[in-house]
Amino acid sequence: MQSMTPAQSTAATAEMICQIKQLKKDRNAVILAHNYQIAEIQDLADYVGDSLGLSRQAAATTSEVIVFCGVHFMAETAAILCPDKRVLLPEPEAGCSLAASIDLDDLKAWKAEHPQATVVSYVNTSAAIKAESDYCCTSSNALKVVQSIAPDREILFLPDQFLGSWVKKMTGRQNMHIWMGECHVHAAVPPSSIDCKLREFPQAELLIHPECGCLTPYLDRITQDNGSCQLKVTSTEGMLKRAHDSAAIEFVVATETGILHRLQKENPGKVFHPIDRKMNCQYMKMITLEKLHRSLVEDVFPISVPEAVKEKARRSLEAMISIF
Ligand code: 13P
Ligand code: SF4
């Protein structure tokens, strides 16, 4: 078979986008996409955002079908929050190394060691883990969730060690135990990258996701500077807001490179440098236009959560949502 010319390929993509838009109408579907998705998916989605924003959008939608362009735990969260909707994930293998870093037996054993503790789980966890948790949190609200818990209550925070260390440092909380999980994309960046990039771009502001392994040696600097420092630790949506509000025109971005598309699109006069071009989440990038199209045509892949798990998991998610 002959391969397509660039012009044919552009026309085929445009045709596919047209069909997806029509299918979306026909099926009364909404397309939600995470900030790490490929540019074409972001541009087509009804809403693009971080984990918290996507949960809120899912909970508020009136559409019958939610097509989740993200990873499995995100689609599962939508299925928990919207029991009467059909939630589709275009690629069932789109997992998350961080969510996989703790399983139910691990959590049950940990809880048994600390029977009085309040369990706070990052949203990057399975529904089964959420069901065994008191609170869920995202990178946008982890500080507020922990601050809302009585100071004398012991906390088990899971599964991300770097997010956990940042929350512990910022809240000054001593009675917080942290699971040693990590995301392979964010953990891989060494602390030396920060100094290296700041030397290369001395005027730039550094936007760092709290899952980043490079963050830990800088925690003292961030705390002491009380927010005025060149380093801003924030969720992916927080990065968008900061890039918009900041007087800086140059930024170094320490998170998955998919976010650069929106940062650049929404701030055409500003410059964004990835801290490391290799920050690529292969799970997020499994979703393609072809798979999104197939998802709407063939009604695949539905995400369901067992009733008993769903009920308990919803409580930890609602405990989080009720704080705001
Ligand atoms: P955000 O909620 O900040 O978008 O993070 C989700 C995630 O998976 C980060 O790797
Ligand atoms: Fe999970 Fe890391 Fe990918 Fe985020 S970037 S979805 S934490 S594997």
Image (spheres, rainbow, N blue to C red):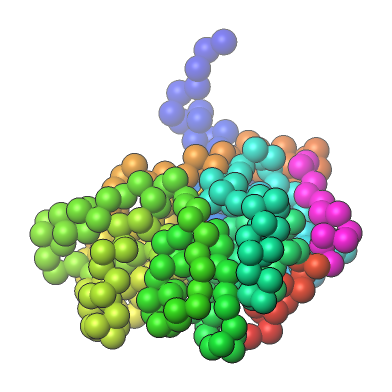
What is the magenta range? 300-311
Q: Is residue 310 magenta?
A: yes
Above or below, 178 relative to 126: below
Task: Using the image as rendered, state which of residue 185 and residue 67 is in the foreground.
Answer: 185
Task: Using the image as rendered, state which of residue 153 and residue 282 is in the foreground.
Answer: 153
Residue 27 location, x and y as percent?
Answer: 81, 53
Q: Residue at x 39, y 51 (%)?
A: 187
Task: Using the image as rendered, state which of residue 300 and residue 41 is in the foreground.
Answer: 300
Q: Residue at x 36, y 71 (%)?
A: 233
> If the image is split into quadrants, where does the C terminus sit?
bottom right
- Outermost residue on the front side: it is 113
Q: Residue at x 26, y 75 (%)?
A: 220
> If the image is split into quadrants, where does the N terminus sit?
top right
Above or below, 84 relative to 69: below
Q: From the viewer's perspective, is 122 left or right of 89?
A: left
Q: From the viewer's perspective, is 313 left or right of 73?
A: right
Q: Is residue 158 visible?
A: yes
Residue 163 location, x and y as percent?
Answer: 45, 65
